[in-house]
Each structure stands twice: as structure tokens, then as C-alpha cells.
Image (cartoon, rainbow, N blue to C red):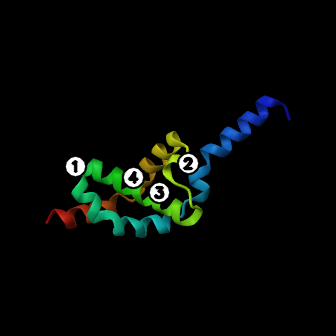
Amino acid sequence: MNLQEQIRKILKEETMFFRRRVNLDKVKELLKLHAQQVFYETESYNRFKYELTLKAVEAAIWQDFGLGWEELPEEEEIEFVTDVSNHFDKEIKKLYKNYRR
């Protein structure tokens, strides 16, 4: 395997970090646990949605692997959190509406 192939392999593995490691069932449960705090820290639904998902994903990674956000690939984290927040949009909307009352 030449150097270019090794670099491609490493980059491909890095881009799969979250998809292979993050337990979405755990993230879904963590959304509920962090919703109240994030609600009071944000000013819009879109910010709430992203920040809540980010907090849940990072908590899941910390619990399972002991890795903090500073040790994670940043660009991939942003993309992954956006995808997961869209996946859980219904659940996140319910949480948001619950705290808006």
C-alpha cells in the first residue's frame, strides 16, 4: 500500500468515526436529559435543535469512550450533529414545545 492509499484509508476511517461509534438510542435518551438546560441557553428553535443534539452526541461519546469534544474531528462532528438533529426533529420539536409553555 503506497502513501496515498494509506492517507485515503485514514481519512475514510476518520469520516466514519461518528457513524460507527455513536449509539442513536442513547442520543435519543440524552436529548430528554439535556433539553431543559439547552432551552434556557438558546434563543431560537434552530439553535435549540442543533445545540441539544450536539450536547447529547458529545455526552454519548464521553460516556462510551471517554473522549471530549476537543478530541473529535470537528468538521465531521458538525455534519453528523446536523444529520442526527434532522433525524430526531419530531422528538426535538416536542421537547421544545414542552418548554415553551
Q: Residue at x 21, y 63 (%)?
A: 97
What's the amino acid at mark 2?
Glu
Query: Pointer 3 and pointer 2: residues touching (CB < 8 Å)?
Result: no
Of the numbered discs in the image, which one, if any, rests on residue 44? 1
Report the Cα–Cα distance between label 4 and label 2: 24 Å
In this rendering, which labeled residue sits more in front, label 1 or label 4? 1
Pick the quarter of the image with the N terminus: top right
Report the Cα–Cα distance between label 2 and label 1: 28 Å
Of the numbered discs in the image, which one, if any, rests on residue 86? 4
Tag 1 secondary structure: loop
Q: Classify residue 73 as left or right of residue 1.
A: left
Tag 3 secondary structure: helix
N-terminal-most mark, 2 or 1: 1
Report the Cα–Cα distance between label 3 and label 4: 17 Å
- Image height of 26 relative to 45, above or below: below
Pick the quarter of the image with the C terminus: bottom left
N-terminal-most mark, 4 or 2: 2
Query: Pointer 1 and pointer 3: residues touching (CB < 8 Å)?
Result: no
Of the numbered discs in the image, which one, if any, rests on residue 58? 3
